[in-house]
Image (spheres, rainbow, N blue to C red):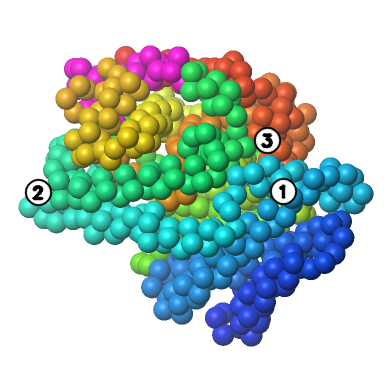
Amino acid sequence: MKNTWDLSFLYSGFDDANFHADLKKWPEMIDEQQALLEADLPVLEKLEKLADSIEALDALSGRVYAFVSMTLSTEANHPVAQQYQDKLSLISNKSRLVDSAITRFVGSIENLDEVIAQSEKLQTIAFALREMKEEASHTIPAEIEPWLLQMSLSGGRAFSQLRGKLESNQMVEFRGKSYPLAAVRGMAYDGDPSVRKDAYEAEIASYKKIDLPMSYCLNAIKMEALTLCKAKGYDSVLDMTLATARMDRETLDAMISAIKEYLPHFRRYLKAKAKYLGHENGLPFYDLFAPVGNASKAYTIEEAREVLLREMGKFTPVMAEFMDNAFEQRWIDVYPREGKRGGAFCSRMHAYDRSLVLTNFQGSFSDISTLAHELGHAWHNRCMAGLPSVLTHTPMPLAETASIFNETMLAHQVLKNATDEERFTLLESSLMESTQTCVDILSRYLFETEVIDTRTDHAMTVEELKDCMLRAQEASYGDGLSKDVRHPYMWACKSHYYSSGLNFYNFPYAFGELFGKGVFAQYLKEGEAFIPKYCQLLRSCGSGTIAEVAASVGIDVRQSDFWRSSLEVVKGEIDEFCALCEK
Ligand SMILES: [Zn+2]
């Protein structure tokens, strides 16, 4: 079994004549699209031609972009790929301008519904067209858009890059030696309590070197968000984010208020973990990720494949077959190696009905869970096969549905046959995750809300930011965390606050986790009959608002009751964990 992925279905290499032909054709196609937009054609004909051209351009840019970026994700210093990456960002900027022009054109069609009704092709993509019309009222005037895009390169995007540099070059003094920040933060998972504590103290002390420039980055990026929000005519940055996520306030409020209701249970878990580790008044921040129990079995990739096929096959044999094929056809780049990026992801090659998965497999159960997660994304992509590409853009909150479903399914199956000791470890790692996606995410949401509000008045100082973060942690973790050992610099270490153009990059995580779990609960209730509905739900993720997509399987995301039912599952795990702690 080969454990690197196979990109030859895209191109045979950077000297492949097809690669160069596509690279030449891409900007030409953008020019043709622009010319089509300016052509004197009847509206219906123009729209149909634009739809074809968007589809063709997506397929071409998708394969060129994937080939370059997938190569770089396993060979960061590939000199040829790096050169092409710069070229590609220039071409995409050009493409973005034409995209906006298309949006404005669609926005200008007053009788859009009548036009759509006249064409079968347009009816298929009606949702995307109506959304464009809606978006058109929030585009930046054409005369200033290129300048704003250009200025963001020296504004928000530059601050975002600076932030990345500050983080990746930050060295931390730990026990007399210098380590990269990421390495010291990784020690939070160490089995030795003194390592976790010393690493935390070293990490906190190190932020003094970068907190001032970090605060400038954050203030600048949020100021840019406020400016863009005004320029696009949104009432608030949150409204702008929700519109992009196809989510309404009611849904967000229902979810947040349900999470708040369940905070006492999360705190119960944190206090039980604290007591288990020998702490009296809540969990010190440095032990949030402390491993518990001794049930750590190691797996080879072949064993991991077997576990996945066996356990996921219990959902449906088709899923097992799909996963087996992903291994067989080399969709997965399995092991860590020098020059390969960390973490895991799944990338969709829509035009090829194929996905590419990257993992850094080291043999733990959590690595198997990661494979289940990423192959869940791949399954989601499979369910969307054959759709026009404009209907395949899943908004962030729905993007984790299939991945969380798979993770939950795997844990559910494995827990059935686990010993008490294995149960204890598995439950704890699941609760550690849920606490991050609910409790920590809530603290980030509260923090970002306050930073954006305050930024309308003034730039926050380092002290104000630290204070704001501690208040957000108090409101979410409460007495689950030890009063004196918290993390006033969480705003400096999480890159999520610093994406120019992307705000509130937090609540979609909570949504994904709880929605995925809720969908799984629905499956448990309905059994096999639910499977086709589930696949249809995944297929429709890019063809409706979040509330509409959820309603298709009978879920009302605007009601706190739905969120409560997912949180009840977590509460069940907390009860069991606390009981096992007492043993
Ligand atoms: Zn994911």
Residue lying at 70% horizontally and 68% vertically, measured from the top left = 34
Comparing labels 1 and 2, the label whose residue is closer to the camera: 1
Crowding near the residue tagged with mark 2, few <14, some 14–19, many ≥20 C-alpha atoms within 10 Å: few
- 191 vs 223, nearest the viewer: 223
Identity, as a three-letter code, of the amino acid under mark 2: Arg
Q: CA distance from mark 1 to mark 2?
A: 61 Å
| In this rendering, position of residue 100 left or right of residue 144 | right
Q: Which mark is residue 545?
A: 3
Q: Main secondary structure of the magenta part?
A: helix
Mark with earlier residue (3, 2): 2
Residue lying at 15% horizontally and 46% vertically, measured from the top left = 208
Check whether the beta carbons of the residues at disc 3 and disc 2 lie within 8 A of each other. Answer: no
- 507 vs 343, nearest the viewer: 507
Question: Can residue 268 be found in the magenta stretch?
Answer: yes
| In this rendering, position of residue 493 left or right of residue 372 | left
Q: Secondary structure at mark 1?
A: helix
Q: Secondary structure at mark 2?
A: loop
- 369 vs 35, nearest the viewer: 35
Read off the residue under disc 1.
107
Mark with earlier residue (1, 3): 1
Report the quarter where the C terminus lies: top left
Extent of the magenta region: 259-288
Read off the residue under disc 2.
175
Percent x, y of residue 377: 60, 47
Question: Can residue 431 be found in the magenta stretch?
Answer: no
Residue lying at 58% horizontally and 23% vertically, measured from the top left = 250
Report the quarter where the N terminus lies: bottom right
Q: Is residue 25 visible?
A: yes
Q: Quadrant of residue 113?
A: top right
